[in-house]
Image (tube, rainbow, N blue to C red):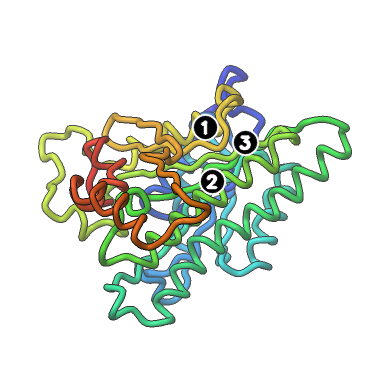
């Protein structure tokens, strides 16, 4: 993994959260392969629900894998849902590599339950790790880039790649906490994209579909190929898009949501107005709304308003 100047991320530094396993690991390896120096963040808990003792092993193993291939990497073992630990993560990148250029937010947990059975803690914990975790790292990265831009008097290099989910696009009955967090991440991404564009920073989100410990139940019926072919659900299908979005080539891509899996990338549009009704009076009455809206919905299948993922041939993920 020697890095000639032709590599697209040569001279850039990156943080990847949740990078000890699965998607985050594949993303960290890809950024390093493309020339970036990487901070591999992972809290290292054994359970996908955030249970178990924190461990340095997952992050450190990825660091060693990058170094063995000739790349540069250091480990960070903090919990990104903790504001101060997120600060230390960004400070580690800046202190080690002189600056931060790329932030890939991937860390997350699952605590699945139907809405009528979900506890307050199950809701709070998933929102905290996914949505607050994305906010925490983004906040401190943004502070860094804004200060650099003011010091230099012009734009700087900054890339944010956030991780949303098809659970946000199409809904997920047993994951109201997860779907809500992933929807919030899209809102955070578009807001960040608008706020930081003048500093030279882009922010985009992906909805990846990949076989990881987070999705082992979802893809239980899809077996991995036994003939040595690349798994269609392998994280390796997702990481090249992250590398692209992190690169100078994607300077014109900002505030976008992209669905990616198995050799496919789809660009999701913002919601469009499907129909519009105007009141015949100063304000709507119940009866008028009933006359206009009830026939409209009676002619359409349930959930058609949220069929964007189905148009792409996607299901739950």
Give the mark nearer the N terminus: 3 vs 2.
2
Going by the picture, which residue comes out furthest to the top? 6
Question: Residue 270: percent from the left, percent from the top?
Answer: 45, 38
Residue 245's label in the rendered image is: 1
Give the mark nearer the N terminus: 2 vs 1.
2
Query: Is disc 1 in contact with disc 3, using a CB cutoff of under 8 Å?
Result: yes
Q: CA distance from mark 1 to mark 3?
A: 9 Å
Query: In front here: 293 or 268?
Result: 293
Q: Which residue is mark 2?
A: 104
Q: For the point 68% across and 68% down, which residue is it? A: 84
Q: Is residue 223 above or below residue 252?
A: below
Residue 39 appears left or right of 243: right
- Name the secondary structure under disc 3: strand
Q: Quadrant of residue 174?
A: bottom left
Q: For the point 52% across and 32% down, which residue is it? A: 245
Q: Which residue is mark 3?
A: 202
Query: In front here: 98 or 221?
Result: 221
Give the mark nearer the N terminus: 1 vs 3.
3
Residue 149 appears left or right of 87: right
Q: CA distance from mark 2 to mark 1?
A: 10 Å
Q: CA distance from mark 3 to mark 2?
A: 12 Å
Query: In front here: 301 or 297?
Result: 297
């Amino acid at each position: 993994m020697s890095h000639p100047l032709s590599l697209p991320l040569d001279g850039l530094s990156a943080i990847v959260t949740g990078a000890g396993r699965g998607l985050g690991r594949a993303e960290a390896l890809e950024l390093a392969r493309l020339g970036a120096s990487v901070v591999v963040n992972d809290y290292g808990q054994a359970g996908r629900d955030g249970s178990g003792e924190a461990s340095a092993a997952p992050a450190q193993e990825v660091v060693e894998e990058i170094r063995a291939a000739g790349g540069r990497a250091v480990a960070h073992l903090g919990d990104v849902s903790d504001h101060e630990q997120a600060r230390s993560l960004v400070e580690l990148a800046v202190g080690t590599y002189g600056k931060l250029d790329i932030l890939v937010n991937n860390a997350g947990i699952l605590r699945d339950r139907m809405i009528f059975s979900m506890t307050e803690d199950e809701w709070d914990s998933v929102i905290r790790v996914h949505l607050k975790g994305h906010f925490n790292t983004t906040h401190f990265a943004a502070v860094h880039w804004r200060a650099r831009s003011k010091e230099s008097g012009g734009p700087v290099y900054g890339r944010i790649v956030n991780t949303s989910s098809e659970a946000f696009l199409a809904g997920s009955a047993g994951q109201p906490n997860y779907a809500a967090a992933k929807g919030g991440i899209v809102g955070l991404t578009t807001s960040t994209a608008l706020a930081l564009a003048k500093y030279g920073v882009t922010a985009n989100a992906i909805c990846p579909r990949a076989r990881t410990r987070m999705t082992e139940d979802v893809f239980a019926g899809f077996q991995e190929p036994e003939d040595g072919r690349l798994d269609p659900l392998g994280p390796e299908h997702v990481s090249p898009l992250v590398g692209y979005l992190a690169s100078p080539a994607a300077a014109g891509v900002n505030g976008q949501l992209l669905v990616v899996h198995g050799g496919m990338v789809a660009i999701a549009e913002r919601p469009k107005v499907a129909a519009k009704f105007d009141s015949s009076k100063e304000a709507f009455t119940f009866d008028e709304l009933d006359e206009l809206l009830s026939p409209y919905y009676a002619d359409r299948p349930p959930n058609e308003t949220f069929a964007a993922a189905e148009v792409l041939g996607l299901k739950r993920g």
